[in-house]
Amino acid sequence: MKRIIVYGLTERRGGIESFFLNYKEYLSKFHLDYIKVTPNKLSYESNFKNSKIFYVPMRKDDAKLRRSKIKEIFNTKEYDALWFNSNDLASIDIIKEAKKVGIKCIGHAHNSRTDRLDRSIRHNINKRLVNKDFDGKFACSISAADWFYTAPKEAKIIYNAINVDKYLYDECKRKKIRDKYNVPDDFMVVGDIGRLEKQKNITYLIDVFEKYHQANPKSCLIIVGTGSKKDSLHDYVKDKSLQSSVIFTGEVDNTRDYLSAFDIFLMPSLYEGLPVTLVEAQAAGLKCIVADNITHEVNVTKNIKYLPIKKESINLWVENILKSNNRVTEGKKLKGSVFDITKSANYLEKEILKIID
């Protein structure tokens, strides 16, 4: 059986991590092992019981150890390909090392820009240097391909698909989550799931909710996820005296239960590749209000409303906060689409075999 080493996992459950958690059980024609860039145990490491997981530090943390660990992995000669998953190409040393020992490289773009100027500069330099080293090119969306590759039309679009049945609306799960946080059944729950980082624009989300809550006090905001902005966001909520109406759950393993508890899903991100949480939200039958920079490729159910994320647009967001209805029926619209993993995994498997055979 062919063996592939996957690069790019972190200790937080973001888009890359969700992609592999969703796809791994459907890819049976080759074996996957993983490289993580955190010394800590992955919060979901138990989901990869049949795979080896190697730790390779980021270059800024320990460049010497990084080189040593990369060489150690590749010198085993166990792997037929490196599957490089990233939001940018600011660091390409692992690709270069793989090519030195004759390992094929698959690039996989998971985002459409970066917040940091230094990474953006390195990315734009490196994508020209590394383009010839990719034996296969994947991207989660057209905008991600445009960002990642010098020849984006060569990339195969591999959508962030899910098992739709797992995310369909569930009344019991809704009640369980609402009871956990003492949220009355007649309250409107506005929800978002994502890392608490600048990209996700959570302060704008809080501003929108503040305005909505003034008009409808029987409402609350649930934010699922963690990140470096956690403390500052807690302070922001406190400054607005919204502590009793805004719930930060931290990282959870059962995001689909929270989607059932929500009444609407908001995502005012500054940018995205193709957010898997937005696919999951649609499967849960939720109406979604999202930033107008997010790709329209994801709007399968036609339940997504795209709005600008300007200060003067806050009222427009508030006006569009409406309770989601017919949720199971709406969620089933994803079945048979490119976001249905039973369809997309077969396509992905065939494309990988073309590269490594």
Image (tube, helix red, strand yellow):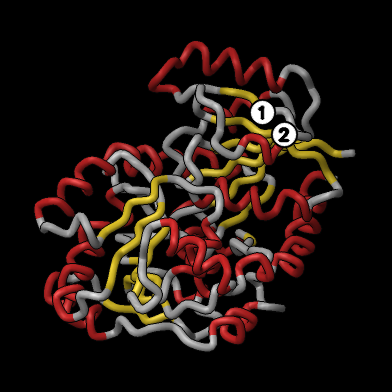
Badge 1 is on which residue? 53
Please, is residue 334 above or below residue 239 in the view? below
Which residue sits at x=58%, y=69%?
Answer: 172
Mark 1–mark 2 Cα distance, whole angstroms, equals 6 Å
**Would you say residue 234 is visible in this rendering?**
yes
211 and 299: which is toward the camera: 211
Please, is residue 74 above or below residue 45 in the view? above
Please identify the residue farthest to the left as the structure is shown.
239
User: Mark 1 packing: few (<14 Cα in 10 Å), some, or many (20+)?
Assistant: some
Which residue sits at x=25%, y=64%?
Answer: 205
Residue 217, quarter of the rendered image: bottom left
Whether tag 1 and tag 2 are in contact, CB under 8 A, the answer is yes
Badge 2 is on which residue? 33
| Element on which disc 2 rests | strand
- Residue 309 got which mark? none
**Would you say residue 157 is visible in this rendering?**
no
Which residue sits at x=58%, y=49%?
Answer: 108
Return the x and y of residue 76 as percentages of the image width and height.
77, 18
249 and 49: which is toward the camera: 249
300 and 127: which is toward the camera: 300
Residue 97, quarter of the rendered image: top right
Please, is residue 196 above or below residue 81 in the view? below
Return the x and y of residue 336 as percentages of the image width and height.
71, 78
Give the amino acid at mark 1. Answer: Ile
Please, is residue 28 above or below residue 221 in the view? above
Number of labels in the image equals 2
265 and 125: which is toward the camera: 265
